[in-house]
Amino acid sequence: MGFHKVAQVRDLPAGAMLDATVGEKSYVVCNVGGELHAMDGQCPHRGGPLGQGALHGTTVVCPWHAWEFDCVSGRHDYNPAIRLQTFAVKVHGDDVMVDVP
């Protein structure tokens, strides 16, 4: 894995999230109270784009069928056996960097 630039800090204010694409894979990056988190950006239910959904605290809501995932742990809200992969995030200067394959 390696860190890839996905956004600038100004694009991700507190309480916001965004879609990020590295290669052919999508990720969702969330700013929860100034802490940045990233996880897989595709909902395992029907492939919905999580970054186009809503962020409520640490909960990302899929825009297609309202499946919910914790952006810190990647866990599904009703079934913790369903878990999305999470990725390290760092800020380098003005750039938001995510550690993805």
Image: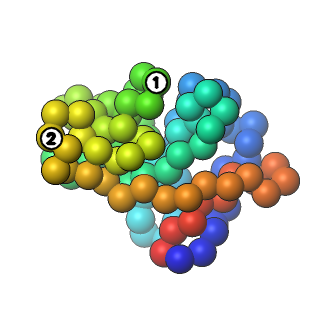
Q: Residues within 10 Å of mark 2 (few under 14, many from 20)?
A: few
Q: Position of residue 79 (x, y in %)?
A: 15, 40
Amino acid of disc 1: Gly
State the residue in front, 67 or 88.
88
Q: Is residue 47 visible?
A: no
**Residue 79, numbered label:** 2
Which badge, 2 or 1, is on the more N-terminal residue?
Answer: 1
**Residue drawn 56% across the image and 58% down it:** 88
Disc 2 residue type (three-letter): Asn
Q: Position of residue 55 (x, y in %)?
A: 44, 27
Residue ranking furthest to the top: 56
- Near-viewer residue (36 or 65): 36
Q: Image point 74% across, 52% down: which residue?
A: 91
Side of 46 relative to 59 (left or right): left
Above or below, comparing residue 98 to residue 8 in the picture: below
Instruction: Name the residue carrying label 1.
Output: 57
What colouring style does the render use? rainbow
Q: Are marks 2 and 1 in contact (CB under 8 Å)?
A: no
Q: CA distance from mark 2 to mark 1?
A: 19 Å
12 left or right of 37 in image: right
Helix, strand or loop status at disc 1: loop
Q: Position of residue 62 (x, y in %)?
A: 30, 35
Compared to residue 56, the image places residue 31 above or below, namely below
Q: Residue at x 81, y 49 (%)?
A: 94
Most foreground residue, 67 or 22: 67
